[in-house]
Image (cartoon, rainbow, N blue to C red):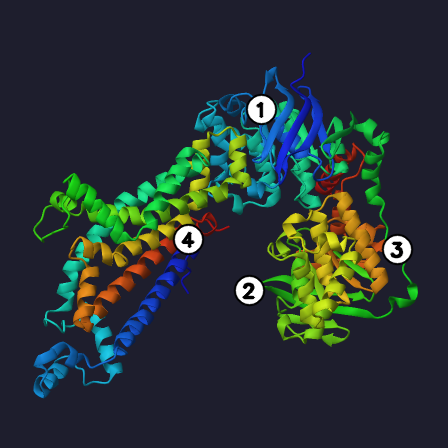
């Protein structure tokens, strides 16, 4: 039997400063009808490029330099645009990582859904619309009859991702490419999307390529897994086999990331809190986002604040930084109340509380060189100039493990994601702070890079006695770095305490929900979890 | 309290700021002219300036009142459509301006009706065939035209179409009783000059606004759904580029009205621009004030319209959660 998709020895090149560089280096991929193949690897491994190539598509600036892509017997490399256009959307569909960006903001969901089937002449608009409602229902979207008539911004992220999966299925394609469809979602939302995608793919008998950097996710979704590294294939095996017995060191190292533990604490220093938040209520306009939030951070320790998006984590950070004035309550730093807005604080106090943002990309001015990024706080807070400043910049670069002579004159655009985040850390360190808020600093990074950042933060904490408030929605990160955990839901603190207590039952129901939603490596985890939850709901109904 | 949905509320707020801006501009116009050196009465009366005629002139135009009173008087009149009398020929300014403004708006409208659709279509085409010969030709041709001063473009057009080919008149002579066809024919060359002047800017902005969007995920998504390239640009990119394009169109429409003094002079077209030039030469300050006020109002109104188009084209504002 011939395969549905057969990619062999595919080479894809990217235009660089000095000609064309190979980014996919002779990779093969086979997908049978109805089969789900997982592609995993770090960013830059070429997963998405390979996934898109299965549609005969490469992003602008890339070109297919060699090899063959056969879909259902047809060669796609060098095929005319009209033939590829006919396949795309109709027989091969794509689900993008960020559905918020991949839906056109100007059109209603259903208009975008129906565009494919109507343009390809598969269905009339009325049929496509009826189909859409059926698919929305199958994807377990709320109000399937009417949700399509909303605009993308009127629908939540998890719902949008399911609507996009529904859109991909509009023409009943033979193959669907899922490009990190749940990476941008909260763990609790991720479960709903994963289960909806899995059931829909099974019911329709579509084949799928599932691209992710999360092994635990791919374990739930894929029949077979292929591991990529820097554009080459590392290994490929049926999912269970790969999880039980990875052959290559690199694959094993992907597993190991989750085992990071912070350095041991000196119990003697644990005494006094450096920062206390007391009964803070704050919000935008009349609606409070934070309600009566209280917790404290001990000197030299890490407090992790966890919760879904919208739970008030980042607003808490804004209140501490003085970007948002609380309507009630106060924030104390070493028992001194912190003024709000923050610019009214004495400069020395501003210096001692620093923040690192989630998106290092947007937190750096693209026209400031590394030297300027770090030099600015050195000048502003510490009054360093000239040679003293230069020396300190180099020291800080060495501190964040970037070779000073190599990096000092670079622009942010010339750094990788992990290097940018390191630069942001150096910028915070330049102020010589005592307390740093880390707002989802590893969320945009893949696991290996993220682990490097966590190790760096841990070492800096040990060496400089820093205190961290670590905001994250990733419980694996919490497990590895936190001393204390604060769980937030809808602007309230629902549970707080030392990490070990938080991760041992009994839990607050919300903490339980969060913890149980973190995907595990076990391929049966999702099915088992869904069954348990269904049983629990059933019991609840009976009682 | 009545609750307005966000759109009307935003539009009302913009209208209010527009009116406030106009008020500030009116004050600036008035005081700027007030600051002109020399005595207006003496300048205008020239050789016939005897103490008696001067006193009578000042009396007639209220020049003896303090400036604040005169400003409020002028503003009050302007609000009711009465801009006072021309100092040079004692005719009511409103009548004088009405004719000229009609001519200017006619010419601007004529040019706009040609230039705006053409610029948008060419901009879309240039974005669609980005990097092709067509794209380069459109960009270079329009750029070449705006690189010349507008009177130069006007003279070249006269040379070719009026002198050599003798297709169109070189003087855009219009009279109140003229039919539309004759008027369009008479004003074709000035209109064409203005089309060439404003096209490049609008066309390049349309192209840039669309090209900006082409790298976005939803445009890629449309390609991956198998949508034709032409449709991707027209249906997926263009609606999201409306706001920046509208802003540029408004700026250029405003330029068609307030910036075409030279074109009017070259073609001896009886529009506002020429009136303004004449009045400045004659020191007819009341007419200058009136004309400036019309220019300012046009500018503000057009920008306001662009703002409103921007608001209405934003689905986040049009369809709140």
x, y percentage for residue B138? 37, 39
Q: Where is the N terminus of chain A found, in terms of image quarters?
A: top right
Of all chains, the one bearing label 4 is B
The answer to whether residue B37 is above or below residue B26 is below
Residue A173, label in figure: 1
Q: Earlier in the sequence, mark 1 or mark 3?
A: 1
Q: CA distance from mark 1 to mark 3?
A: 51 Å
Q: CA distance from mark 4 to mark 2?
A: 24 Å
Q: CA distance from mark 1 to mark 4?
A: 38 Å
Q: Residues within 10 Å of mark 2 (few under 14, many from 20)?
A: few
Local SS, label 3:
loop
Q: Same chain for the residues at labels 1 and 3, yes or no?
A: yes
Q: Same chain for the residues at labels 4 and 3, yes or no?
A: no
Residue B311, label in figure: 4
Q: CA distance from mark 2 to mark 3?
A: 44 Å
Q: Residues within 10 Å of mark 1 (few under 14, many from 20)?
A: many
Q: Earlier in the sequence, mark 2 or mark 3?
A: 3
x, y percentage for residue A5? 65, 20
Q: Where is the C terminus of chain A found, in terms of image quarters?
A: top right
Q: Residue at x 64, y 32 (%)?
A: A13
Q: CA distance from mark 4 to mark 3?
A: 54 Å
Q: Which residue is identified by label 2?
A: A286
Residue A263, label in figure: 3
Residue A3: in sight, yes or no? yes
Q: Which mark is nearer the camera, 1 or 3?
A: 3
Q: Same chain for the residues at labels 2 and 3, yes or no?
A: yes
């Amino acid at each position: 039997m011939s395969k549905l998709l057969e990619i062999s020895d595919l080479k894809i090149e990217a235009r660089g400063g000095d000609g064309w560089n190979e980014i996919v280096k002779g990779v093969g991929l086979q997908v049978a009808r109805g089969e789900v193949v997982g592609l995993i690897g770090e960013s830059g491994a070429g997963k998405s490029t390979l996934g898109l190539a299965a549609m005969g598509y490469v992003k602008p600036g890339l070109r297919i330099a060699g090899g063959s892509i056969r879909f259902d017997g047809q060669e796609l490399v060098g095929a005319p645009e009209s033939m590829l256009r006919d396949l795309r959307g109709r027989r091969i569909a794509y689900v993008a990582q960020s559905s918020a960006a991949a839906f056109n903001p100007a059109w209603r969901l259903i208009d975008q859904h129906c565009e494919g089937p109507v343009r390809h002449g598969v269905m009339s608009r009325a049929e496509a619309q009826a189909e859409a409602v059926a698919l929305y229902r199958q994807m377990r979207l709320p109000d399937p009859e009417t949700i399509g008539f909303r605009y993308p911004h009127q629908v939540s992220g998890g719902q949008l991702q399911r609507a996009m999966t529904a859109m991909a299925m509009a023409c009943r394609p033979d193959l669907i490419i899922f490009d990190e469809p749940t990476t941008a979602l909260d763990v609790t939302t991720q479960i709903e999307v994963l289960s909806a995608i899995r059931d829909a793919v099974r019911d329709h008998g579509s084949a799928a390529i599932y691209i992710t950097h999360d092994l635990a996710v791919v374990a739930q979704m894929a029949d077979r897994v292929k591991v990529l590294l820097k554009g080459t294939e590392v290994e490929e095996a049926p999912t269970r086999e790969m999880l039980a017995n990875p052959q290559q060191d690199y694959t094993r190292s992907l597993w190991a990331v989750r085992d990071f533990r912070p350095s041991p604490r000196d119990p003697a220093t644990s005494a006094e809190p450096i920062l206390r938040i007391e009964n803070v209520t704050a919000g935008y306009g009349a609606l409070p986002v934070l309600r009566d939030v209280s917790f404290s951070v001990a000197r030299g320790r890490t407090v992790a604040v966890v919760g879904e998006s919208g739970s008030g984590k980042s607003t808490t950070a804004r209140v501490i930084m003085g970007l948002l004035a609380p309507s009630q309550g106060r924030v104390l730093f070493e028992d001194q109340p912190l003024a709000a807005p923050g610019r009214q604080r004495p400069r020395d106090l501003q210096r001692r509380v620093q923040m690192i943002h989630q998106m290092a990309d947007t937190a750096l001015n693209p026209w400031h060189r590394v030297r300027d990024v770090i030099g600015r706080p050195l000048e502003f807070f510490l009054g360093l100039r000239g040679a003293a400043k230069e020396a300190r910049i180099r020291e800080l670069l060495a501190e964040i493990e970037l070779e000073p002579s190599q990096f000092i004159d670079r622009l942010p655009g010339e750094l990788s994601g992990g290097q940018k985040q390191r630069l942001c850390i150096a910028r915070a360190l330049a102020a010589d702070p005592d307390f740093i808020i880390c707002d989802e600093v590893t969320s945009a990074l893949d696991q290996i890079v993220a682990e490097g950042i966590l190790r760096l933060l841990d070492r800096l904490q040990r060496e400089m006695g820093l205190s961290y408030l670590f905001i994250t929605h990733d419980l694996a990160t919490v497990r590895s770095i936190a001393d204390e955990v604060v769980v937030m839901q809808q602007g309230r603190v629902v549970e707080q305490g030392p990490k070990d207590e938080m991760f041992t039952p009994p839990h607050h129901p919300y903490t339980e929900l969060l913890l149980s939603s973190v995907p595990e490596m076990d391929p049966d985890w999702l099915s088992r979890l869904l069954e348990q939850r269904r049983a629990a709901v059933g019991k609840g109904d009976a009682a | 309290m009545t609750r307005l949905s966000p759109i009307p509320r935003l539009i009302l707020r913009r209208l209010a700021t527009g009116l406030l801006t106009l008020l500030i501009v009116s004050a600036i116009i008035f005081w700027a002219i007030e600051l002109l050196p020399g005595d207006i009465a003496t300048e205008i009366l020239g050789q016939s300036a005897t103490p008696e005629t001067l006193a009578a002139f000042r009396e007639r135009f209220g020049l003896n009142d303090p400036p604040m009173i005169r400003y409020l008087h002028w503003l009050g009149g302007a609000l009711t459509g009465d801009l006072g009398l021309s100092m040079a020929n004692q005719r009511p300014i409103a009548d004088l301006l009405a004719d000229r403004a009609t001519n200017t708006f006619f010419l601007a409208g004529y040019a706009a009706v040609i230039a705006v659709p053409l610029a948008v279509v060419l901009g879309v085409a240039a974005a669609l065939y980005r990097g092709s010969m067509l794209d380069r030709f459109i960009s270079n041709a329009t750029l070449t035209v705006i690189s010349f001063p507008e009177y130069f473009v006007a003279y070249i057009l006269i040379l070719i179409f009026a002198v050599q080919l003798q297709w169109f008149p070189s003087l855009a002579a219009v009279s109140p009783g003229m039919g539309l066809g004759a008027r369009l024919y008479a004003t074709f060359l000035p209109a064409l000059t203005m089309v060439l002047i404003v096209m490049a800017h609008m066309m390049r902005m349309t192209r840039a606004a669309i090209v900006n969007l082409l790298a976005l995920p939803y445009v890629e998504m449309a390609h991956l759904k198998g949508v034709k390239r032409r449709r991707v640009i027209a249906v997926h990119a263009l609606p999201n580029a409306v706001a920046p394009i509208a802003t540029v169109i408004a700026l250029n429409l405003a330029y068609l009205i307030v910036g075409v003094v030279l074109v009017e002079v070259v073609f001896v077209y009886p529009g506002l621009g020429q009136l303004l030039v004449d009045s400045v030469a004659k020191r007819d300050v009341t007419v200058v004030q009136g004309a400036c006020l019309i220019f300012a109002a046009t500018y503000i109104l057009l920008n306001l319209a662009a703002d409103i188009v921007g608001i209405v084209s934003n689905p986040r504002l049009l369809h709140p959660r």
